Image (spheres, helix red, strand yellow):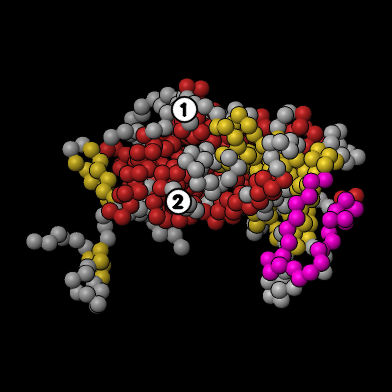
Amino acid sequence: MGEAQGCRFEPTFNRSVKVGAGDDRLTSDAGVLLVREADQRLGLTASLAAQLSDPRDPVKIRYQMSELLRERLYALTLGYENQDDVDRLAHDPAMRMAVWDRRGQAVLQERLASQPTQSRLIDVLAHGGRNLLVLRDALGDWVFRHIRSTNRDARVPAATIDVDSFAIEVHGCQEGSQYNGHYRQTGYHPLVASFVVGGDYDGARDGLRLGNGFVHAVLRAGNVHTAKGVFRFVRSVLTKTKDLARELDFRLDAGYTGGEVLDFLAGEKARFLGRLPTNPVLERLAAPHLRRPPGRPPREGYETIVELGQHRAESWQRSYRLILVVVDRPDPKTGQLTLQPDFFFLITNWPVEQRTTEQLLEHYRKRGTFEDRLGEFREAVGPHLSSPKFVENEALLLLSLLAFNLGSFLRLELEDDAGACLDLQRFQKVVLKAGGRVVKHARQLHVHVAQAVAPLWNRLWKRLQRWRLTRRRTTPNPPRRRDWMPPPRHAHLAEVLNL
């Protein structure tokens, strides 16, 4: 005897198929439960919420700060980049179980916060005293918690910091948005720093994937120079990351290798490797090494690495090791060499006995994978900086980076276990956006997920059980148990479709 259900339509290709709706305990985002488990074990949103100031009247509060943060961060982690998406996710059973601090079956009776409430959260984060600084510091703190929980509360042997800027396009009259001639678009020009164990984002060795993530970020106006504020930025990054690795080096693009930055890093005994912008003095040094050898050039062209010894510009306080890289490749269409070979300079304080010129060039070229991560961040999380105020858009950017870190922690654990590489978008689609059904049984909630994701979930669950949070990063006590508060009368208890 079949089950009685309201049938919406019957396909003509197979009359045995009946398509209906009405079970409000189905979810397409069951992976949010894995996100909450990772969050809970590391104490991420709980520690962040405990440090934020909340100006709201406690008597009138329905949603705690930790719950509001989880709802917004989890939505971004799953790829829901628009704030309007929370109106639909507020009714998703898996999201409701993952977000609420309360236990038991009552979580399925709760409706999560709506889009206007989430907008008020951004107001609190942006205008609530030191809240923006707390949000920014959480980037490094979350990476610290992941590294220490997977590395027996010890620093990693070696790590690299990549510093770079990128463009975020906006459409509107947002405060601080300007036209950038380099990117040929109107928007913002943020500066970010990323931490990578061993200097290789795609490293295949066990453990080298764990702990990678963004550790610092600032939002800047769209038309600022790429090096604007970089000295203060690098100084803050070094302070935030000195407890993460025993040996730390910076990998810098040509816009950030000013004398003030290089002299500071050398004075702090931090290694660096950066590209120098070309100038007439450097061109004269390169000229003797640009002559091509006689004879027919090889099909793949030439690449020459020349150690030029110590070099000191007029504005520098110290001299550093200068390396010339000559890249003479044939045109891919004609097969002919260009009129003059291309070349660039690397500057570093790595001693020759520790890293050869070939090793330094290989290390610098791995910076390309960091640029891939920036593209991955834009595609998988896609921050929409649509608020009218600059500080509100900076809060949105920081939340997006935190969500990227949270999703990356899980993605990197699966990569390390399987010995494979997954971009975050694929991880979202294959692992996190899993179908599931919630069943009440014996005062418990049973979540049945799609069979296709079960092996991946088992792998991830075993990895999460190995995490041991350091005592220096304890999880705050959970909020005081509250009585169930029904939603307000104006709240939609069923999902409303907005197009």
Image coordinates for residue 60, horizontal then vertical, percent = 45, 33
Other residues around mark 2 within 10 Å, as few (<14) / some (14–19) / many (≥20): few
Image coordinates for residue 75, horizontal then vertical, percent = 46, 48
- Quadrant that contains the N terminus: bottom left
307 and 47: which is toward the camera: 307
398 horizontally vs 173: left or right = left
**Which residue position holds label 1?**
152
How many numbered callouts?
A: 2
Q: Work out whether residue 120 can be spotted.
A: no
Image coordinates for residue 206, horizontal then vertical, percent = 47, 41
Q: Which residues are magenta?
A: 283-308
Q: Earlier in the sequence, mark 1 or mark 2?
A: 1
**Which residue position holds label 2?**
420
Q: Work out whether residue 292 can be spotted.
A: yes
In percent of the image, x 29 and y 53: which residue is there?
450
Disc 1 marks which amino acid?
Arg
Tell me if residue 163 is in the magenta stretch: no
Mark 2 secondary-structure assignment: loop
Image coordinates for residue 436, horizontal then vertical, percent = 30, 51
Disc 2 marks which amino acid?
Ala
Residue ranking furthest to the left: 1
